[in-house]
Image: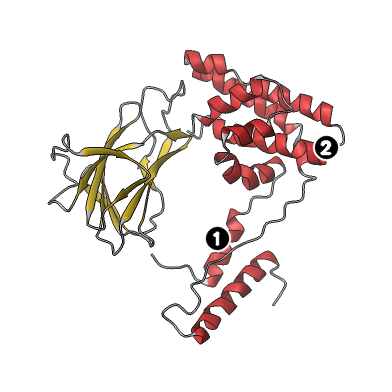
Amino acid sequence: MRRPAGSELKNRIKRSWVVNGLIVSAAFLVMQSNAQSASQTATILKTLGPRSDTVIERLSLLNRLPADEWRFHEGDITHGESADLDDSAWEVIKGPRGISEDAVWLRRTIEIPKNLNGYDLTGARIWFSFRADANAPVPEIIYFNGRRVALGDDLEPIVLFDNSRPGDKVLIAVKLLRTVDRKTFVGSELKIDFAENRPSPEDIRTEILSTALLIPAISKDVPADTATLEKAINAIDIEALDAGYQTKFDASLKESRSALESLKPLMKQASLHVTGNSHIDAAWLWPWTETVDVVNPLIGDFINTIDPTRT
């Protein structure tokens, strides 16, 4: 895959920076909140009522489809992507799992469930990503229902379902090509973009965690702002989710977001300092002079992205 030119990279970075009150905090913390362990999340929410843990846990179960188990075949075979291939005798594995340096195949069928922990995924977009490692990027070929959809290494997520419907199915086959070192199957992910006509449970979850983390640091009236946050949390109707009442659950998310809106002026007071990082394999298979030639313009691009008035 090609590396974007400096100006293109700069434009991409600018487009990705969203500066809008509460959303700034959410965007900054979303990566952390997705990776929070149960104990870390509990620490963030420890100043809130007991219902907070239940709400956050339930919302966290709605943003990804499970895809842990894969059927695995060591060694290459002809047309391992074919929908007619019988893989019932293949070993079932989960990541992380060490595998050989030879070419291997992994397959599994993904079906949109009737509901995901009570949530109807009708209209959602599902993104598929696959991770393998061999002390270097692993060349791979991805097939959906026998049709090749991607080839390369370090592949970006691919749309698996667009405007999904319960019962929709796709057979995924992944061929990992031969590598110098032994490979590791790290795992796969099926991330959900919720239907545009419904409020996003993941956005609400992220905003709650972000706000809970920032209130003690920037609020001048912690008890009052905490009470507002708890009002937003308590508005979320988990019982409606359990019962499958989608409209009622969506209405509760909108009520929660409305309560969070009142905290937006407070969130705008937060100052976020972001430090970028870039990895360059200095002088690896090229002379040091070429390393300098590559690094200098790259650093300049990042400086200009932060402050376009500098030259």
User: Does residue 118 sit above or below 187 in this rendering?
Assistant: above
40 vs 173, nearest the viewer: 40
Q: Residue furthest right?
A: 220
Instruction: Report which residue position mark 2 lands on.
Output: 219
Residue 54 picture quarter: top right
Is 111 placed left or right of 26 in the picture? left
Which amino acid type corresponds to the residue marked 2 in the rendered image? Ser
Question: How packed is label 1: few (under 14 Cα within 10 Å), some, or many (20 or more)?
Answer: few
CA gap between label 2 and label 1 equals 33 Å
Which amino acid type corresponds to the residue marked 1 in the rendered image? Arg
Question: How packed is label 2: few (under 14 Cα within 10 Å), some, or many (20 or more)?
Answer: some
Residue lying at 41% horizontally and 33% vertically, measured from the top left: 65
Residue 45 location, x and y as percent? 68, 30
Residue 64 location, x and y as percent? 45, 35
Instruction: Indicate the secondary structure of the residue bearing disc 1.
Output: helix
Instruction: Report which residue position mark 1 lands on.
Output: 12
Residue lying at 61% horizontally and 59% vertically, measured from the top left: 14
Is 183 placed left or right of 298 in the picture? left
Residue 212 location, x and y as percent? 71, 34
Indicate how the structure is coloured in the image. secondary structure
Q: Earlier in the sequence, mark 2 or mark 1?
A: 1
Residue lying at 76% horizontally and 31% vertically, measured from the top left: 262
Q: Quadrant of the N terminus?
A: bottom left
